[in-house]
Amino acid sequence: MAERSTVESFPALVERWAKSDDFEGELVHSRVVSGREAVFGDLSTPLAGPLAARLAERGITGLYRHQAAAVEHIRAGRHTVLVSGTASGKTLCYQIPIVEQILEEPASTTAMLLFPTKALAQDQLRSFREFRMPGVAASTYDGDTPGDKRLSVRKHSNVIFTNPDMLHFGILPNHGKWADFFLKLRFVVVDEMHILRGMFGSHTAHIIRRLRRIAEHYGSNPTFVFTSATIGNPSNLAEALSGLDVTVVEGDDSPVGARVVAMWNPPLEDPEKGTRRSSMRESTDLFVDLVRQRRHTIVFSRGRKSTELIFRWASDRLEPELANRIAPYRAGYTPADRREIERRLFDGELLGVTATNALELGIDVGSLDAAIINTFPGTLASFRQQAGRAGRAKDDALVVLVAGADALDQYFMHHPDELFSRRAEAAVVNPDNPTVLDAHVGCAAHELPLTHADATFFGDGMEESANRLVQAEHLRLRGGRLFWARRKSPASQINLRSSGGPTYTIADQDGELLGTVEQERAFRDTHRGAVYLHQGATYLVDDLDLDRHEIRVSERRVDYYTQPKEEKFLEILDVEAKGPLGSLTHWLGTVRVESQVVGFRKKRLGSGKVADALGMEYLDLPPTTFETQAFWFTCPDGVLDEAGVDPRDIPGTLHAAEHTMIAMLPLFAICDRWDIGGLSTPFQPQTGTNTIFIYDGYDGGAGIAPVAYSFGHEHVEATLAALVDCQCDSGCPSCVQSPKCGNFNDPLSKHGAIRFLRIVLG
């Protein structure tokens, strides 16, 4: 990599930032994480001469110990999970067995590799083709594959790179066209499995089961290989995704240089309200300084808008020669544009790139000197994945976490050791979600008639699911087998990132499609009068058509945003577990949630003041009802009395505790606050007392609540710590305020919540 600055070491650079008046933020913590030397391992059977020679041409003369262990398991036909860090050589672990098998039996070996993004599949295809081995014919097969090339790919390729969406929509419903490929299927690779969580992961779990069923139909029994960044439950996740027993290879024996990790907090602008300078502005300051030092730097942001803004602000401040050597990178660009940015980054032409998590995954962009992470990315797994983008060789590197105002960001600023020592969170899926199960049992029946034996793939819930589908006249019994009874393929009716309900299309007045939104968020975010943002432009929603599932918008420049007013009702349907938690009772079970958006209000941008003297505007929208997994806390009045909470402050006390609990939940399960809902009340008819509910925000549940329940005491402790550490006076976005609160963050009592939880924990 050219133009590496040797003037200033990374520890000295961070110290300069902390002392200079040119940088407004505070260096909360920094440390040097030591590098490590490579540890190599041996294979019981050495690589074949031609394969070894090809690897040597690429500079690979030996395998790291974790690579050798994984190759041995995969060779032996064991379903394997490989968990290790960024740039640790996970790809080679499955490439070697696949190539070996094709060299040995070229006429009877195929492999299918599933990636969460098209860009990653393209990158891995390039890597695979570097083997240049006779008999290996690798191709992508996804939504970007031209129609006139698909037949050729099916007939001539023995290694297919695709994604769960194409497998679901295009390959499995048309398995007859792939008969020869499935007959020879020896390997299935599921890369970056930690991305397969929540509803998308729950759907993918059944897509994988349908794949196993089709493979068995054609007489094959492929070996499954899963790869992942470090997560808290690799074996549980892989087994939930596949329904198979797996062997875990966990560790990283690849070499890495020392890494300076700095934690940077934007300054408080209003201590009373807890507001801070924009993390985007702080990230831009640091990015500009690194680029001027010719340090090859990536800035990660959580959204497209922040990615574009940091790039624009940095370009405006840099000298023209340097401004031409930075670029933004995000989804929405054409494949050709993304490939060109990746090439320029890999070749060292670019000094800097601002990116969404589209570059978090394993796309090879060469060696980078520094990674700036603009706000905590939601999980330790993602943070460590993004941090690993810096120093992908033996060179020293710099990682800077620039905190946002979110409670989780500020929690780590006050507890920096947690960022380094805490075990990564669990990634959760819920294949037992009845809505998801019904959808894929229907798909399976469309692909091949169902029999009792298929419970091997779909579990004990298949019989009840089949009964529901028969009652709905989606399945028909004939000759002891269940057939799909409708004309239209069920696969096309399923949204893989939702738990059901219609998807609404968003279009402007000329009919141009701007996007889609699931029903769960359509009423909240795209009701009549709502402000809708798209690629930096502001639109107002003119109409929400409930019958046609269409949303019409008009581009307008406005100086306000909208907040929906939501009313909720919750009913406990079933209790799965209960136990004491301090002076509370902690419950896990199933609930029915009914929510209704009843109106909205406008707020001035920047000021937070209500923009319209008319106050609330009311809406006439139907309620939405769903059943889901939940955990909840019940609290006798005596606990609140002991905490000194005035009876008038009880609603605000419970409400504040609920918000902060939701904000801290991603410490324990990979999720974000939009995956979760909550309700707190001084009196719930079924419990008869003060109750705080937290539930999965999807019909049937996404598997978050059971994991959160198991961490109950730690969860409450982290909630109290976040409340106590926050420097605001009466509550702010860093502790008790939520951007998705349907009650406009009112009432909230931060001090009541602190007193309450201190008494609860003794």
Image: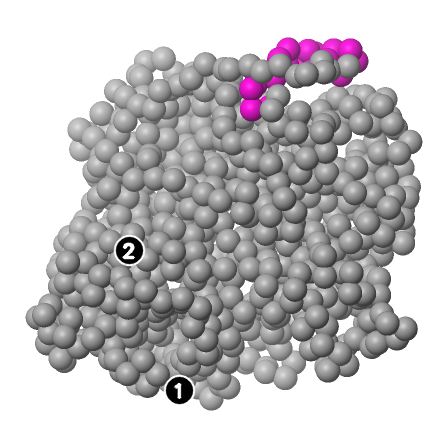
Q: Which residue is mark 1?
A: 618
- Disc 1 residue type (three-letter): Tyr
Question: Looking at the image, which is closer to me, 476 or 158?
Answer: 476
SS state under label 2: helix
Q: Is residue 757 above or below residue 166?
A: below
Chain-order first, disc 2 or disc 1: 1
Q: CA distance from mark 2 to mark 1?
A: 40 Å
SS state under label 1: strand
Quarter containing the C terminus: bottom left
Q: Residue at x 25, y 77 (%)?
A: 690
Question: Looking at the image, which is closer to me, 729 or 279?
Answer: 729
Q: Is residue 681 magenta?
A: no
Q: Which residue is mark 2?
A: 713
Q: Residues within 10 Å of mark 1 (few under 14, many from 20)?
A: some
Q: Residue 702: give x, y in percent of width and height.
A: 52, 62
Q: Residue at x 66, y 34 (%)?
A: 123
- Disc 2 residue type (three-letter): His
- Residue stretch in magenta: 49-67
Q: Residue 180: give x, y in percent of width and height.
A: 90, 44
